[in-house]
Image (cartoon, helix red, strand yellow):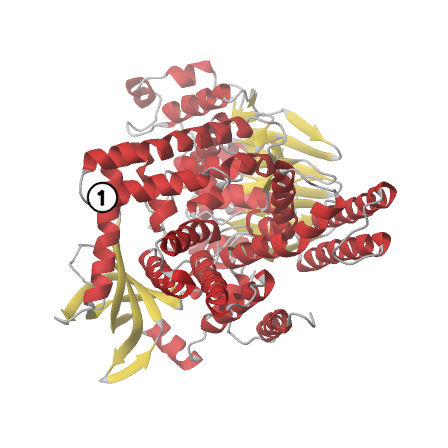
């Protein structure tokens, strides 16, 4: 550190920012605007704002505009509110740099509502965006705009159109790699690249800047411009390229380091990787402190830090001489440096990526050059652009096939779960101590002794330190039974984690949110280190209970997730249920719009395609797992599923003296039938039926089950009136404490078989 004071300054700055965040200063997380202004906006969401257009994004769902230097207008007074993202129903021509005044509804950017879920609030905070303007309409706009900024924006769009014509179905990948435009990327392709551990090539990164920037610098030098001329021109071009691609954190880091590298060549000074990295970090953090908790920032800088610190040690310890071996060790070093960050944000790490990157990294330059040539040639001839794109498309074909093959490997991905901060600190301490021990063993610093015995001992000590760190990172306390009711909007989704390990999923779907499986369920499972579900239970086939499960099963069958399932457990409605035609369903009491039969059949077919056994459950069946037992109380043996709600699966979970009751969407009709059988007993936990509908959870039912704690899963924007005030009143009168996912986010209940406790992902868990 004494030889690199900039590194020490960077670490001190990061520590200081972290301490200020812990003390409650909203520099990194939260909303830094004055509380009085935040309160006023909350009370008066209908607002008029003015700002300068930074960029526009047109999708099939909406037209959005990024505004910078925004201020709120209230009675002729102006209040600065940083930047915002504005959503409009109709597209409008808004050149970059145009000053606009717009009216709409200001909504604060929400953070995650479930463990492991993507943090939109932190993502937008890095751009100094804390509010969205929904349903916006332009009141007036200036006639002046930024001619240069608009030309850059138009050039980017033109390149996008050229690539669409020249590269066909591979165009979105070229657009992401060259232009930072990811809006057209197929979600399945991103998942496949993620499993293969090569998703980083889809972002503008240091690799891109190095290949393009240094390539241009060397070309200009050969043309006789010299270090100064070539350096200044290359720097100018790369700065414009950074602006063209949207200024992602990895691109800004790479451009800054490229600037320092070329600057060192111009003035004849040596270039130090770690010093350049630290200075880049300082500049970015001073511009936007929220980057400190950004996955992009931590992964981008962590990867380079791993190459600059860990890689030299490992390479010399192993005595690596061949380039391929060195490349493997460099890839491994990056994985070691970024492992805790990957687990904190994604819960998993691609093991196959260490090997796959040996093939991808040396050849990705070919994709970049092919795409760049195609873009430039397309300005003059599309036919030439098509030919130029061919080499890159061939490489992309092999990348995708490689990722698909990697996804089929049994140990392609390691899902370690989300570690706590103390676990990350212990891991890095183990890593540092392991490196220090190798230096002590070999007796030299940075230049390790060549003796074979000393090298073997150093390898053993370092390996032991890494393994110890990984064991600490992957530790999860699984001594208790854990029930998590996910916040999926208007729907249900519960994960049951058994004592000692093993997990079950019961329902997961939503009628108010899309892609619940990918964006809420899978992130939660990965955050808990769950890669295998002993069983997936479905109470009934309403969309708000199965859409996420259907999505999960499809991802499993396509090899796009590391999560596997042991069985799909469905209510036993008889074989004829899956073959009923709409007219037959109508005769049996189901509405003509009911699609339960098709959904039931679709679930079974998707499960069979993925090789997942199907189990049918009915009243009287039970399932044991360790000391826990699942007893199925419904449906009755002769149930047909004509009414999916009333004939749904009802399950009682027992563990020690703990009793938990899961009632799906049954109403008072089924409650009365079950009361007559005497199957109900006092329960500690109740998953309230039908999202708190007034027609469920009747008084007689509550008198029988007398729940200590109840959870209602629903959305605060639903149009069904859930939860019903009458139902809530009945629950409270029965003595139950009631929690709501719409208020607390995911709600988790813990029990050791005797006592229970509960916590919400968002405070408070219970109303005041």
Locate the C terminus by quadrant: bottom right
In the rendered image, residue 610, in percent from the top left (x then y), is placed at 51, 22
Snapshot quadrant of residue 757: bottom right
Horizontal arrangement in the rendering, residue 749 relative to residue 188 (left or right) = right
Q: Residue furthest front?
A: 224
User: Relative to residue 142, is residue 600 depicted above or below?
Assistant: above
User: Relative to residue 744, is residue 191 depicted above or below?
Assistant: above
Q: Is residue 391 or residue 484 the one in the foreground?
A: 391
Residue that carries the numbered disc 1 in the rendered image:
161
| Element at label 1 | helix
Snapshot quadrant of residue 358: top right
Horizontal arrangement in the rendering, residue 408 relative to residue 654 (left or right) = left
Q: Is residue 645 or residue 429 the one in the foreground?
A: 429
Which residue is drawn at the image coordinates 41% and 23% (left, top)?
602
In the rendered image, residue 705, in percent from the top left (x then y), is placed at 61, 44
User: Relative to residue 342, is residue 264 depicted above or below?
Assistant: below
User: Relative to residue 574, is residue 404 depicted above or below?
Assistant: below
In the rendered image, residue 475, in percent from the top left (x then y), is placed at 72, 47
In the rendered image, residue 749, in percent from the top left (x then y), is placed at 63, 50
Please indicate, yes or no, whether residue 664 appears anywhere in the rendered image.
no
């Amino acid at each position: 550190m004494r030889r690199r004071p900039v590194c020490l300054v960077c670490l001190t700055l990061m520590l200081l920012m972290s301490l200020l965040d812990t003390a409650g200063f909203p520099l990194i997380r939260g909303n830094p605007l004055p509380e009085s202004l935040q309160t006023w906006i909350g009370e008066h969401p209908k607002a008029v704002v003015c700002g300068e257009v930074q960029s526009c994004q047109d999708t099939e769902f909406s037209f959005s505009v990024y505004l910078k230097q925004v201020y709120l207008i209230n009675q002729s007074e102006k209040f600065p509110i940083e930047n915002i993202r504005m959503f409009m129903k109709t597209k409008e021509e808004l050149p970059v740099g145009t000053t606009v005044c717009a009216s709409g509804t200001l909504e604060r950017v929400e953070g995650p509502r479930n463990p492991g879920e993507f943090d939109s609030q932190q993502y937008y905070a890095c751009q100094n965006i804390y509010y969205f303007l929904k349903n916006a309409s332009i009141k007036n706009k200036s006639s002046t705009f930024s001619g240069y900024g608009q030309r850059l924006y138009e050039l980017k769009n033109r390149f996008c159109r050229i690539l669409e014509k020249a590269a066909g179905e591979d165009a979105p990948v070229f657009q992401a790699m060259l232009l930072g435009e990811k809006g057209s990327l197929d979600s399945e392709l991103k998942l496949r690249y993620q499993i293969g551990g090569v998703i980083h090539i889809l972002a503008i990164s240091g690799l891109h800047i190095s290949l393009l920037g240094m390539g241009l610098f060397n070309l200009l030098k050969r043309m006789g411009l010299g270090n100064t001329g070539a350096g200044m021109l290359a720097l100018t071009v790369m700065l414009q390229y950074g602006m063209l691609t949207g200024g992602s954190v990895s691109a800004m880091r790479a451009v800054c380091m490229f600037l320092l590298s070329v600057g060192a060549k111009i003035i004849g000074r040596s270039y130090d990787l770690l010093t350049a990295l630290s200075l880049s970090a300082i500049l970015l953090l001073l511009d936007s402190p929220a980057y400190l908790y950004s996955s992009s920032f931590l992964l981008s800088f962590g990867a380079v830090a791993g190459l600059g610190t860990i890689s030299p040690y490992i390479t010399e310890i192993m005595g690596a001489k061949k380039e391929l071996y060195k490349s493997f060790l460099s890839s491994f070093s990056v994985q070691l440096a970024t492992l805790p960050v990957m687990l904190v944000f994604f819960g998993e790490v691609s093991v196959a990526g260490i090997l796959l990157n040996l093939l991808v990294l040396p050849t990705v330059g070919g994709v970049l050059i092919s795409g760049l040539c195609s873009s430039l040639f397309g300005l003059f001839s599309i036919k030439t652009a098509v030919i130029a794109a061919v080499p890159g498309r061939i490489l992309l074909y092999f990348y995708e096939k490689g990722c698909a093959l990697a996804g089929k490997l049994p140990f392609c991905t390691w899902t370690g779960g989300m570690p706590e901060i103390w676990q990350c600190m212990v891991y890095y301490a183990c890593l540092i101590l392991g490196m220090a021990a190798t230096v002590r063993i070999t007796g030299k610093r940075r230049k390790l002794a060549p003796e074979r015995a000393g090298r073997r001992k150093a390898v053993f000590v370092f390996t032991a330190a890494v393994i110890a760190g990984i064991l600490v990172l992957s530790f999860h306390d699984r001594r208790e039974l854990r029930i998590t009711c996910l916040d999926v909007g208007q729907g249900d989704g519960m994960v049951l984690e058994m004592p000692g390990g093993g997990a079950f999923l019961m329902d997961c779907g939503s009628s108010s949110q899309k892609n619940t499986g990918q964006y809420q369920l899978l992130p939660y499972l990965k955050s808990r280190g769950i890669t295998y579900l002993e069983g997936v239970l479905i109470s009934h086939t309403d969309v708000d209970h199965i859409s996420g499960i259907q999505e999960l099963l499809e991802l499993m069958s396509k090899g796009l997730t590391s999560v596997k399932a042991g069985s799909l457990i469905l209510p036993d409605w008889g074989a004829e249920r899956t073959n009923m035609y709409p007219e037959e369903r109508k005769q049996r009491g189901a509405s003509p719009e009911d699609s339960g039969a098709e959904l039931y059949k679709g679930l079974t077919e998707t499960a069979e395609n993925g090789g997942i056994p199907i189990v049918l459950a009915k009243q009287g069946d039970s399932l044991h797992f360790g000391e826990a037992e699942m007893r199925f109380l419904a449906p009755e043996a002769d149930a047909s599923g004509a009414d999916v709600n009333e004939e749904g699966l009802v399950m009682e979970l027992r563990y020690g003296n703990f009793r938990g009751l899961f009632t799906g969407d049954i109403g008072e009709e089924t409650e009365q039938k079950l009361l007559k059988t005497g199957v109900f007993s006092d329960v500690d936990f109740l998953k309230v039926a039908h999202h708190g509908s007034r027609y469920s959870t009747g008084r007689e039912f509550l008198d029988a089950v007398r729940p200590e704690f109840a959870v209602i899963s629903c959305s605060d924007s639903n149009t069904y009136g859930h939860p019903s005030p009458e139902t809530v009143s009945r629950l409270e009168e029965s003595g139950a404490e009631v929690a709501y996912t719409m208020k607390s986010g995911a709600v988790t209940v813990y029990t050791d078989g005797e006592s229970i406790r509960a916590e919400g992902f968002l405070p408070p868990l219970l109303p005041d």
